[in-house]
Image (cartoon, grey):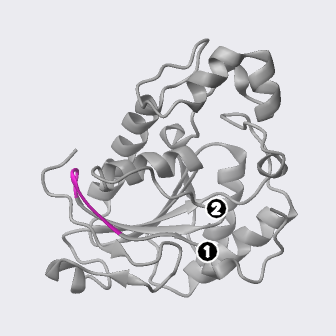
Amino acid sequence: MGDAVHIAKSVELGSRDAVELNDDRDAQSVHPSVDHAEISLVRHGQTDWNIDRRIQGQLDVKLNEVGRQQTHAVADRLSKEREISAIYSSDLKRAIETAEVIAATCGVREVIKDPDLREQNPGKLQGLSSKEAASLYPQIYEAYRSRSCDQEIPDGGESKDQVYQRCTSCLQNIGLKHKGERVVVVTHGTVHTSIYRQARPNEGPAPKVQNGSISILHLFSRDDWVVKSWGDHSHLNQTEEKL
């Protein structure tokens, strides 16, 4: 964690323009300058397993119809904003589907796939509903649900700390490579939680982000991150919600 984490505090998380700036440098950073990269962090569109509260983990699950609508809404919004230099994505199908629609709409030639942006691996719990997981593997499920970041998940799973290490390192490298540019990163819920923990280490748990939401970060250095907005889903107002 850094020694200079600057934060633009959102007055109402999830609201696109309700942002309170507390740093003069931030106030001048409406568009990325050469001293930072702007990251548009996108949670993939909805899947049927999201609806069923089934643990997806690192299994490949495709988007459902609502997820595809969400993805097109995300892409439409991003296409109306500043030019995108690159799009990075988890290499899981639901994220790639989301990223490819964004790329096609925004005129970006390729999606760069990175396994370090994957969802947490919950081991034997993958594919199970929460009820099934609690019944079949109660100890593993308890470990998975633990708020302790260093809690290991038995039988091949990842702790939250392991997810944190790989995804924040990945985002740091992306930020350093793309200073002065705007980049889209498509990933998963637990990765969002890890990134929020990196940017706002002194706060409580990260606010939950819904499928198809967009969060904006400015990365100045490996340890100097600004959260400009978090979990904005105002662009999804016209999509059908089945949640």
- Decide: is 88 above or below 109: above
Residue for badge 2: 210
Left or right relative to 4: residue 210: right
The x, y position of residue 114, in whole percent, is: 51, 43
The quadrant of the image that shows the C terminus is bottom right
Q: Position of residue 87 (x, y in %)?
A: 51, 61
Query: Which residues lie in the magenta part?
Result: 221-227
Q: Would you place residue 88 above or below residue 150 in this image?
A: below
The answer to which of 13 and 219 lies nearer the viewer is: 13
Count of numbered labels shown in the rendering: 2
Marks 2 & 1, CB-CB < 8 Å contact? yes
> Type of residue at label 2?
Gln
Q: Is residue 134 visible?
A: yes
In reply to whether residue 16 is colored magenta, the answer given is no
224 magenta-colored: yes
- When asked about the image quadrant of residue 35, the answer is bottom left
Residue that label 1 marks: 233
Residue 19 rendering spot, x and y as whole percentages: 38, 81
